[in-house]
Image (cartoon, coloured by chain):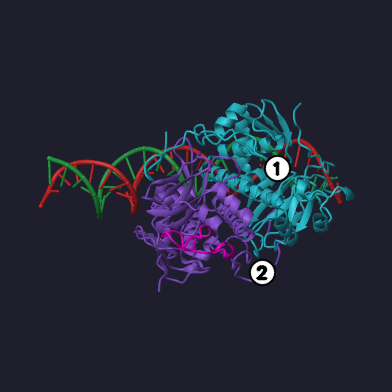
Chain colours: A purple, B cyan, C green, D red
Amino acid sequence: MAPTASTSTASHARPQCPVCVLRHRGQCQGINDRDLAGSAALEASHSPVRIYDAGEVVYAQGDPGAHIFNLISGWVALHRDLADGRRQIIRFLLPEALFGVEPEGRDLGHGATAITNASVCPIGRAKFDDLRHRTQSFNERFVEILQQDQHRAVEAFTTLGQGSAKERVGGLLNELALTAAGQISIRAGAAFKVPLTQRHIAEATGLTSIHVNRVLRQLREDRIVEFQHGVLSIVDPSKLQALVDIGLGALTKPQRAVGHPLGVPMPAPSLAATSTTGRYQA
Amino acid sequence: MAPTASTSTASHARPQCPVCVLRHRGQCQGINDRDLAGSAALEASHSPVRIYDAGEVVYAQGDPGAHIFNLISGWVALHRDLADGRRQIIRFLLPEALFGVEPEGRDLGHGATAITNASVCPIGRAKFDDLRHRTQSFNERFVEILQQDQHRAVEAFTTLGQGSAKERVGGLLNELALTAAGQISIRAGAAFKVPLTQRHIAEATGLTSIHVNRVLRQLREDRIVEFQHGVLSIVDPSKLQALVDIGLGALTKPQRAVGHPLGVPMPAPSLAATSTTGRYQA
DNA sequence: CGATTGGTTGATTCTACTCAAGCCCGGTGG
DNA sequence: CCACCGGGCTTGAGTAGAATCAACCAATCG
């Protein structure tokens, strides 16, 4: 069974929601925090779910970060726009993602736009923080998410800074497949609905959509990945891995903790670069 | 008085330390958390300060994240290395920076290398988390730092993805000056000791050191910034700002909360891009 | 003193961008 | 029903920005 992502239009998927715990009202349904189940405090923190059409803005860059959001269904892009029209897409969000977090008192440094029809669960920042203070496990979950975001950012940053066009596009597609599948590896031939345009990919990778087109063709001709008609198919997972994995000979690969840690920490060969100079490892 | 950064070799600077609160032993001195002052719990969490020579590795990519570090003196680079020798510098750390944070149970996705002689204050991850659980204000401080890191990452990511070579180098130098000065703006002619090589800049901006050299010359000839002989001088702050500020007409600029929020939240004009298509704003 | 590191410059190559055109498809309206 | 239109995709031709290759200089160091 090829894991086809739930991305039709406005699917009635009800993924787990790390923020909300209300079972009634037909809103958020998941309960990830035992301590909060049935909590009156949490119930009071809840706001009605918001629905967006594809292309609609969830929040704009520069808005005050009055709410934190949890994506219930659909895809959302986080992006930072420049005055002259350039846009950098920071990240594509799939259901269950938490977003709209900003440091105390600062306006949002990025915007969020629905890519498909989407529904999100908003919660006031003050209420959110209040909840965190009340419930340790909830706070820990939030901290964990922040730390994972940071980890992801380091990887993406490296790909963007050091990768060739092929590596960047390949890295993005790989990341998308992994996230959509919720797996740490992908079988050959696996296919996913990915509702992105070549332009989205361009804005996420810092390339021109025209060039993305050529790169996609190359990746197809190289029999690595295909992305056409809204469907992403992994032709050769090992080749894709090789393309992306220029990072570290063996480290940092088989781990992928989502929510709860999965793999056992490895011994790790430990690079030993003692000088800022020269090549760092062969 | 040009604020010259304390970066000679192993200066005996004693900046505030958000982690440690011990006053004795001549180690960390700052107390940023009232609730923890004199706390026996915190004292028990303290490990001896570690000293590194320039070029030494604080921790390697792939190491288990058993400790969190607080930079006491000197400069440190966080970086992610690729198997073929490429290196992306994620961030340059100045004293007071917290680093080595990784999601629960995962190995470090990046390494840390001392650029100058440096001293850091390590604290065991378990002890750190224990402290967070015990003391809310400490936990909040940590969350705030994570959020600020994330905010910074978004900006850096955008510059890397969308910026030209000049914008990237300019952006980095601007960021460095701002951080070194601890200010939100820089006076014309301000100069700072910046212990980086052109290669460091190259690895941070995703360029070749050769090209960085040319770009630095251009910036000098354009009378914007100069960086020579380890000294960074801001020739024309407004031109530098213009180079960097392609981001947003007016938003996201004058805010810069360090530790405690400084500026008042602004109303913010709020971009209104309602379509994923077309240019996003003029 | 030779060796190494960091910086500088020139010449050349190549990756990715720009400009330009054409195609396919779905929607809209005469 | 069909002409028209716009968005997304595709391809070609020319260009530019950054990388690569190759020296060379200055300072530091063992």
What's the CA distance linking mark 1 and mark 2?
Answer: 35 Å
| Residue at point 68%, 50% (across, down) | B142
For mark 1, what is the residue? Answer: B197
Residue furthest bottom as drawn: A1
- The vertical placement of A16 against A90, above or below, is below
| Residue at point 76%, 49% (across, down) | B35
Q: Secondary structure at mark 2?
A: loop
Specify start and end residues of the magenta stretch as a single range.
Answer: A15-37
Q: Amino acid at mark 1?
A: Thr
Q: Is residue A27 magenta?
A: yes
Residue D8's x, y, as percent? 34, 50
- Viewer-proximal residue, B51 or B197? B51
Q: Amino acid at mark 2?
A: Pro
- The vertical placement of A56 against A181, above or below, is above
Residue A180's x, y, as percent? 46, 63
Q: Can residue B207 be seen in the rendering of this structure? A: no
Q: Which chain is disc 2 placed on?
A: A
Residue D15's x, y, as percent? 43, 38
Q: Is residue A216 magenta?
A: no
Q: Main secondary structure of the magenta part?
A: loop
Q: Of the numbered discs in the image, which one, if any, rests on residue A265?
A: 2
Q: Which chain is disc 1 placed on?
A: B
Q: Can residue A25 be seen in the rendering of this structure? A: yes
The image quadrant of residue B243 is top right
